[in-house]
Image (spheres, rainbow, N blue to C red):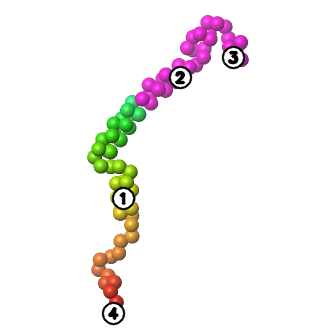
C-alpha cells in the first residue's frame, strides 16, 4: 500500500523505505556480540561452565552449621 503513495524515486532510495535502519542496528550490535562470544569461549575454557557456576553458587549460599556447636548429645 505504501508503494502506491510514493513515487518511483522515493521507493528506490534508502530514505524512502527505511530499511537502512537494520544495517545501522547490525553495525551497532555486532561488536557487543563478538565480545560476548569471545568472553564466553574464554570463560568456558577457564572452567566456568554452567555446572561449575551452579556448584559455586549453591556452595556459597548453602546453610552452614557453626563449627563451635557440638552436635553430639549423650
Q: Which residue is mark 3?
A: 2
* Residue hosting label 1: 55
Viewport quadrant of the N terminus:
top right
Residue 58, quarter of picture: bottom left
Q: Which residue is mark 2?
A: 21
The reply to whether dot 3 and dot 2 touch (C-beta < 8 Å) is no
- Helix, strand or loop for disc 1: helix
Place of residue 38 in the rendered image (x, y in percent of width and height, measured from the top left): 33, 36
**Residue 68 screen position, x and y as percent:** 29, 80
Say which residue appears at 60% left-offset and 14% top-offset. 16
From mark 3 to mark 2, how far is it between C-alphas? 18 Å
Query: Is 20 situated left or right of 57 in this image?
Result: right
* Neighbour tally class for label 4: few under 14, some 14-19, many 20 plus, Cα within 10 Å: few
Q: Tell me if residue 1 comes above or below residue 55 in the rendering.
A: above
Precedes in sequence: disc 4 or disc 2: 2
Marks 4 and 3, Cα distance to the nearest angstrom? Answer: 88 Å
Which stretch is magenta? 1-30
Query: SS class of the residue under badge 2?
Result: helix
Whichever of labels 4 and 3 marks the residue nearer the N terminus, that label is 3
Q: Pick whichever, 43 or 21, lies toward us.
A: 43
Instruction: Identify residue for label 4.
Output: 74
Residue at 33%, 40% in the rendered image: 41
Residues at badges 1 and 3 in contact (C-beta under 8 Å)?
no
Amino acid at each position: 500500500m505504501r508503494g502506491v503513495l510514493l513515487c518511483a524515486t522515493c521507493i528506490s532510495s534508502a530514505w524512502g523505505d527505511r530499511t537502512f535502519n537494520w544495517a545501522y542496528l547490525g553495525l551497532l550490535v555486532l561488536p557487543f556480540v563478538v565480545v560476548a562470544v569471545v568472553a564466553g569461549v574464554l570463560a568456558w575454557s577457564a572452567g566456568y561452565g554452567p555446572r561449575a557456576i551452579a556448584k559455586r553458587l549453591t556452595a556459597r549460599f548453602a546453610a552452614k552449621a557453626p563449627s563451635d556447636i557440638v552436635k553430639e548429645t549423650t
